[in-house]
Image (spheres, grey):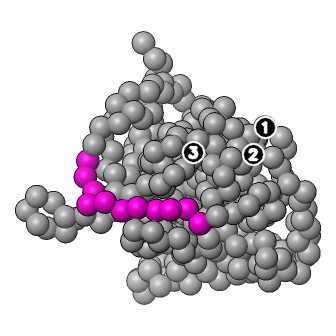
Amino acid sequence: MRPEHRLPIKVSAALLMGVATQLVPSEARATCCEYQNVPVYVHAEFVGAAAGDMVGNRITRTSMLAPVIGAIEVEYPSVEQYTHVFHLDDSSGRWISESTGDSNQVTQGWTCSHPLDPYDMVTMRPGVLVQAPSDGLRDGVNAAGQENELQATQYTPWGIVIAGDDPSLDVMGAPGDTSYTDVVAGAGSAACSATALYDGYESPGGYHLYAFSHYLGAGVNGMCSDYMTSFCGVPRNATLTYSSTYAYNAASAMYSAIYNECNAGLSWLDNFLCAGACDSTANQVVNAFLENTAWGANNTFESGVPAITGVMTPGNLMTRGGTRVPPPITSSAGGWTTEPGRVCHPGQCY
């Protein structure tokens, strides 16, 4: 019997939220995390920030959540304006804590029937990042005058991940640019209490796409806004109800975005060998969002989506819990420096 074809499913990193090529074991791995000096590329920072401030990124149309936010934004236009929130850790404006999913750590091309690794989709890496650099991706010029891409990074047991999720400091990072991010000053505690990192399938330190449609309870990491309310001292606002019509529209919009991105990246040969792979890919993402499983690669949302209640979206947290102000942003020539950071590796600490 011919083995199942493994195709190179291509879904952009930006669309899937920012893909290590290894399967995640079902059991947790021991992890040692230590604070020590690490090399960091510093390009920009929030000026005048204070520990405990909460930053919200306005809707990033290339984010996996953008179709969802775009759909529910119609129901609550004054609220749903953000795709991500994170905690400022100190007054330098360079260090943050957050919970985020990185598509570069979702194994793609798993099999024809399951193009995305179901384990990776349900509990996304890296999840919680503590004292991560705030400035996201960075384009720079090396000593020879050649343009190269530099990035703020965070060390995890599964490799170095992009940290910060703040393209405003990159794409829109001119001095004083305030068009992309907002700050709620003093929204949280000076430091976040949770330091648990992703350590395996269903890890409490992982990022859960399902948390955007179902509240997972107090003290659970969930998604970015759940992390802020559970571990960073940000009060949880009264939640809103998103009608079944808008919940369906959100699922449908997410399906279409993933399907189109996937289909654009496949060759005719891949389509021939793995017919329907992009349909399965999109269904896996939507099923993880609505049902907390990516094992089913069939379309289930077409039969209807119930109303979404009890969840705390980034927009709700940003717009209904304090006074938003544009953050002063400065950009510098950029360069590598050594500053305190969090380094993690597999195994026990000795």
Q: Which of these two is toward me, 123 or 266?
A: 123
Name which residue lies at 10% across and 58% down: 143
Q: Quadrant of the C terminus?
A: top left
User: Residue 249, image x and y in percent?
Assistant: 79, 81
Relative height, residue 350 to residue 58 (above, below) = above
Horizontal side, residue 18 vs residue 295: left or right = left
Question: Would you name the residue on which mark 2 appears?
Answer: 234
Q: Hey, what amino acid is under mark 2?
A: Val
User: Residue 175, image x and y in percent?
Assistant: 39, 68
Number of the front mark, 3 or 2: 3
Name which residue lies at 74% across and 61% down: 323
Q: Which of these two is toward me, 60 or 322?
A: 322
Horizontal side, residue 102 vs residue 234: left or right = left
Q: Hey, what amino acid is under mark 3?
A: Ala
Quarter occupied by residue 173: bottom left
Q: Hey, what amino acid is under mark 1?
A: Gly
Helix, strand or loop at mark 3: loop
Magenta residues, as a range? 326-336
Question: Would you name the residue on which mark 3 appears?
Answer: 50
What is the C-alpha distance between the residues marked 3 and 2?
A: 14 Å
Is 332 a magenta residue?
Answer: yes
User: Residue 289, image x and y in percent?
Assistant: 73, 63
Main secondary structure found in the magenta portion: strand
Whether residue 332 can be seen here: yes
Helix, strand or loop at mark 2: loop
Q: Earlier in the sequence, mark 1 or mark 3?
A: 3
Question: Would you name the residue on which mark 1 appears?
Answer: 219
What is the C-alpha distance between the residues marked 1 and 3?
A: 24 Å
Q: Earlier in the sequence, mark 3 or mark 2?
A: 3
